Image (cartoon, rainbow, N blue to C red):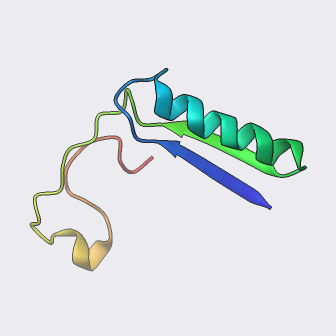
Amino acid sequence: MKFLGISGSPIKTGNTAYAVKYALDIIQKEGHEVTFVSLAEKKIKPCISCFRCRGTGICWQEDEMAE
């Protein structure tokens, strides 16, 4: 089974990142595949509720959210 751990904290090496990595370590030791993603240094703009994405599923704003 695959697990994805996402740290949404703006602090790259803070408590949230530590907790997510700790949980993933335990899961990995059980033989599962894990991936860690940190949003700390990503440029992600807030949603402005323009609903342009309804038709395409893609936000018109240019940022790193699509990753």
Residue 1 located left or right of residue 66: right
23 or 47, which lies in front? 23
Residue for point 39% across, 30% down: 40
The answer to which quarter of the image holds residue 53 is bottom left
The answer to which quarter of the image holds residue 3 is bottom right
**Quarter of the figure with the N terminus:** bottom right
Residue 61 located left or right of residue 17: left
- Say if 19 sits above or below 51 in the image: above
Residue 8 location, x and y as percent?
Answer: 40, 41
Residue for point 34% across, 29% down: 10
Q: How many marks?
A: 0
Residue 60 location, x and y as percent?
Answer: 20, 57
- Say if 59 sits above or below 40 in the image: below
- Say if 14 sits above or below 42 in the image: above
32 or 57, which lies in front? 32
Residue 44 location, x and y as percent?
Answer: 28, 41
Residue 24 located left or right of residue 17: right
- The extreme bottom residue here reads 55
Residue for point 58% across, 36% down: 19
Residue for point 11% across, 66% down: 49
- Say if 14 sits above or below 7 in the image: above
Residue 37 location, x and y as percent?
Answer: 54, 39
